[in-house]
Amino acid sequence: MGKVLVIGRGPAGISASIYMQRGGLEVTVVAKDDGALSRAEKVENLYGLEKPLTGREVIQRGVAGARRLGVTFKEAEIVSLTRGASGRGFLTKTAGGEELSGDAVVLAAGVARSAPSVPGLSDFIGKGVSYCAMCDAIFYRGKTTAVLGAGEFAQHEADILSLVVGKVVLLTNGLPSPKIEGRYEIYTTPLQAVTGDTRVRHVQLTDGSELAVDGLFLAWGTAGSTDLARRIGAIIKDNHICVDEHMATNVPGLYAAGDCTGGLLQIVKAAHDGAVAGLSILKYLHF
Ligand SMILES: Cc1cc2nc3c(=O)[nH]c(=O)nc-3n(C[C@H](O)[C@H](O)[C@H](O)COP(=O)(O)OP(=O)(O)OC[C@H]3O[C@@H](n4cnc5c(N)ncnc54)[C@H](O)[C@@H]3O)c2cc1C
């Protein structure tokens, strides 16, 4: 019996888990919260609804149905996704440091996190502003880099950078400082602007100070689907994970479903993607 990890308990993740559990796989769904639907006040465009439900009610029903079938649920934020030790299967790490493994993974973590709106920031994406420490740290060997973020995800990115770069500073853009005494210089003052020429050179803070940086890594909020996918080598286009008609990414065993794959950002489409991904994994692991 294969073991599958599903990241996300929105309609895509739940739908995938139901198909795989019914197909005889051992399925664990890991999610940090109820996702996009937790913000939906009234859902009434779903087949089979006699009256509108809140987004949370939709999720609760989905989770309860999957749990009844035997799906295991874990409440945790995933901060990294890598290949298993032998190069087979996958290993994920939670913000609490727990490692979870799977023979296959469904990424159903919704749309990517957004970066805060800071003048100049988006102008330097790919010119010193990066979304992926694991991918780009090597380009900053011995140099000064800043990580923009204040949560577990930002700390994880800073830890990866610190193995390679000369110096890491953490910029929380006004959010409280995380309790990580002594590991990095931390600036909690909000950002005024990101400046440079052909590349990023400085970060200006609202107190008038300026920090010279060679690279700026975005780790705002939590790791979204595209962040996790990018790190393991999945192809991303226009901030969406590229999948084929089986919801397979270019990484064998890694599937993606729902909002993170783009297209119609609606429950029905996410549920459809999840079902296709689940059925594809059944074939992938059984044949
Ligand atoms: C305000 C609002 C109202 C909406 N109303 C409707 C509507 O009426 N009808 C409709 O069809 N659609 C509606 N939508 C759209 C719908 O919510 C989405 O299309 C749908 O939820 C996408 O499902 P998903 O499973 O892809 O992602 P999501 O539902 O966003 O689920 C993502 C899951 O991934 C988890 N996750 C993310 N990152 C991590 C991580 N690093 N570690 C662990 N877990 C993680 C989240 O906790 C969550 O469980 C609405 C959206 C919003 C924002």
Image (spheres, helix red, strand yellow):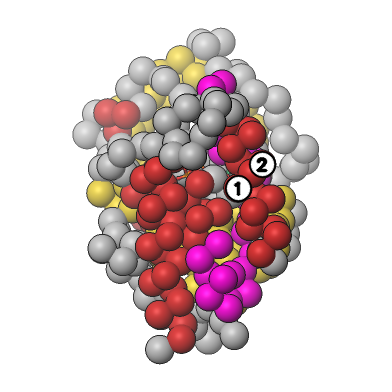
| SS at circle 2 | helix
Instruction: From the viewer's side, name the closer residue of 202 and 52.
Output: 52
Question: Which x, y percent locates residue 176?
Answer: 70, 25
In the picture as drawn, the residue positioned furthest to the top comes out as: 207
- Quick check: 199 left or right of 132? left
Going by the numbered disc 2, the residue's amino acid type is Gln
Q: Quadrant of the N terminus?
A: bottom right
Instruction: From the viewer's side, name the closer residue of 239 and 282.
Output: 282
Query: Residue 221 appears in which quarter of the rendering?
Result: top right
Q: Quadrant of the C terminus?
A: bottom left
Confirm whether the magenta stretch covers residue 205: no
Going by the numbered disc 1, the residue's amino acid type is Gly
Instruction: From the viewer's side, name the closer residue of 234 and 218.
Output: 234
* Residue at x 58%, y 76% (from the top left corner): 25
* Residue under numbered circle 2: 60
| SS at circle 1 | helix
Decide: marks 2, 1 in contact (CB < 8 A)?
yes
The disc label shown at residue 197, or none: none
* Residue under numbered circle 1: 62
Question: Which x, y percent locates residue 90?
Answer: 53, 73
Rendered view: 60 above or below 286: above
Confirm whether the magenta stretch covers residue 33: yes
* Residue at x 29%, y 60% (from the top left corner): 243
Instruction: Please state the extent of the stretch shown in magenta in the rendering.
Output: 17-42
In the picture as drawn, the residue positioned furthest to the left comes out as: 198
> Is residue 216 shown to the viewer in this render?
no
